Structures are given as structure tokens and as C-alpha cells.
Image: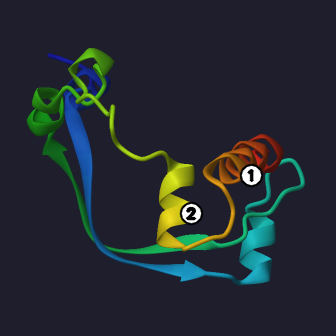
Amino acid sequence: MPGIAQLLSDRALRVSGTAQIVRDSDLRESLAIQGKAPDFVIAIHVKEAFFHCSKCMIRSKLWQAEAWPDLQGLPTLAQTMVDAGQLELTVDEMHEIVINDERTRLY
């Protein structure tokens, strides 16, 4: 008879419910990592949760980079932010902000 780990290895946890963005300072401070508290918390109110067959994720090849679509020609995050925000920054300036933010804000 297979163990519980083997039974669950090809399953996904399916969760239904609602979520809300929370800015409560006590809650944010309780979730601090290395002295850095998050700017906000996503609170999930679970209505139901159950294990589900993960065949759709396996078939999607989500974790196989060679199966991913070609992204050439799509705008970068910096380009999207400049365009959507109608910013006066250049794409290169926004790219530097994004890169520096990732380096300094990650734990």
C-alpha cells in the first residue's frame, strides 16, 4: 500500500473562497522576515479546500521551460509600466528602478 506522500504527490490543493488585501500593522509586523514587514497581506477566507487531480498542470508542462511559449516581441515590465502609466521616464530608467527595487526589497 502506498504511503501518504506517494498518494499526494500527483495532487494539487484546490482552494475556493475570497481574498482581501489587508494593511493591518499588527498583522504585517507578525509576518516580518529578517526585520522587514510586508506592505500588505493577502488574507484568504477559505470556503472549501480539497485535493484535486493535477493532470491539467502536468499536461500544461508548466515546469518545463522548453515547452513555454516564445515571449520574443512582448513588452518588458518596464515598457508596460511606462506605457500604461503614461510616465515621463524612459524605459531604461524604469528598468533600473525595477531592478534596483528587486535587489533592495527582497528580504
Which kind of residue does numbered mark 2 sit on?
Val
Residue 14 position (above or below residue 84): above
Q: Position of residue 91 (x, y in %)?
A: 61, 51
Q: Position of residue 76 (x, y in %)?
A: 48, 45
Q: Position of residue 10 (x, y in %)?
A: 20, 28
Q: Name the quadrant containing residue 86.
A: bottom right
Nearest the eye: 11 or 77:
77
Which is more foreground, mark 1 or mark 2?
2
Q: Name the quadrant containing residue 19.
A: bottom left
Mark before the other along the chain sequence, 1 or 2: 2
Residue 35 position (above or below residue 48): above
Residue 48 position (above or below residue 23): above
Which residue does the numbered mark 1 point to in the structure image?
Answer: 97
| Secondary structure under the numbered disc 2 in the rendered image | helix
Which kind of residue does numbered mark 1 sit on?
Ile
The residue at the point 80 percent across, 63 percent down is 37
Nearest the eye: 45 or 57:
57
Which residue does the numbered mark 2 point to in the structure image?
Answer: 82
Tell me the tag on residue 28.
none
| CA distance for labels 1 and 2 | 12 Å
The residue at the point 10 percent across, 28 percent down is 59
Nearest the eye: 104 or 86:
86
